[in-house]
Amino acid sequence: MTLKKLTLLFVHGWSVTNTDTYGDLPEKLCLEAQNYGFEIESKDIVIGRYVSFQDEVRMEDLAIAFGEEINKITALNPSKNHQIACISHSTGGPIVRIWWQRWLNTHHKTANCPIRYFIMLAPANFGSSLIKFGKAQIGHLKSVIEGSEPGTNILNWLKLGSSASWSLNKEWICSNGRQISPQGLFPFVLSG
């Protein structure tokens, strides 16, 4: 039996610098998928590697960097039968959603979206109450000790009810539903 190829992306949150966030989930999914006819290649995308701790970096910059990763994957796997699925946590959710909105606005249709399934685990779609720690003096002290910046633009986007997060969500809430289609992206949100 020929297995269908799928790239499974794990998009980590803003302050993650290692790939322990998902535990054994990537390995378990790769093994279990074979029972359903899929061969999965899993790949971690750590937003911290996208210089998210530099103050001038914006969420849009991270979405562009994420898009470059998608372009690399599609270039290596040009077959129409190759699929990409994405699981994100925390800040990874809005990063992928911003990328998706940019992709949709460029292509004006949902068909042929490179990502087929998008699972958000506790996404920071409307911001995060944890941002107060990153913006507090202790967060700034940690940045100084580690020789980085706190990532002010990212933290401002992630502030609960920020105008930037509202703008992204309003575009989805007030839309005609074009973001989701049987041929395009199929998103899920799981929160605990």
Image (cartoon, rainbow, N blue to C red):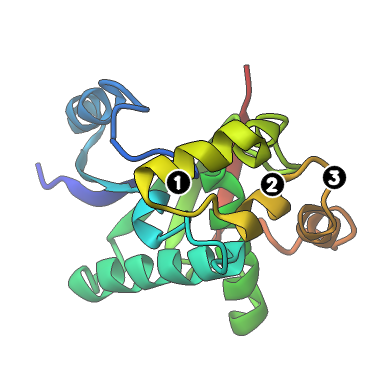
Image position, residue 187 (x, y; %) = 59, 45
Residue on which the image places disc 2: 158
As drawn, the residue found furthest toward the right would be 174
Tell me the element at label 1.
helix
At x 72%, y 30%, the residue is 129
Q: Is residue 114 visible?
A: yes
Residue 144, labelled with which disc?
A: 1
Q: Is residue 181 visible?
A: no
Tell me whether circle 3 and circle 1 mark residues in contact (CB < 8 Å): no
Q: Nearer the viewer, residue 85 or 145?
A: 145
- In the visual, does 21 lie left or right of 43? right
Residue on which the image places disc 3: 161
At x 37%, y 51%, the residue is 147
Label 2 packing within 10 angstroms: few (<14), some (14-19), many (20+): many
Q: Amino acid at mark 1?
A: Val
Q: Amino acid at mark 2?
A: Leu
At x 29%, y 36%, the residue is 18
Image position, residue 102 (x, y; %) = 62, 73
First in sequence, mark 1 or 2: give its number: 1
As drawn, the residue found furthest toward the left would be 1
Residue 35, by quadrant, is: top left
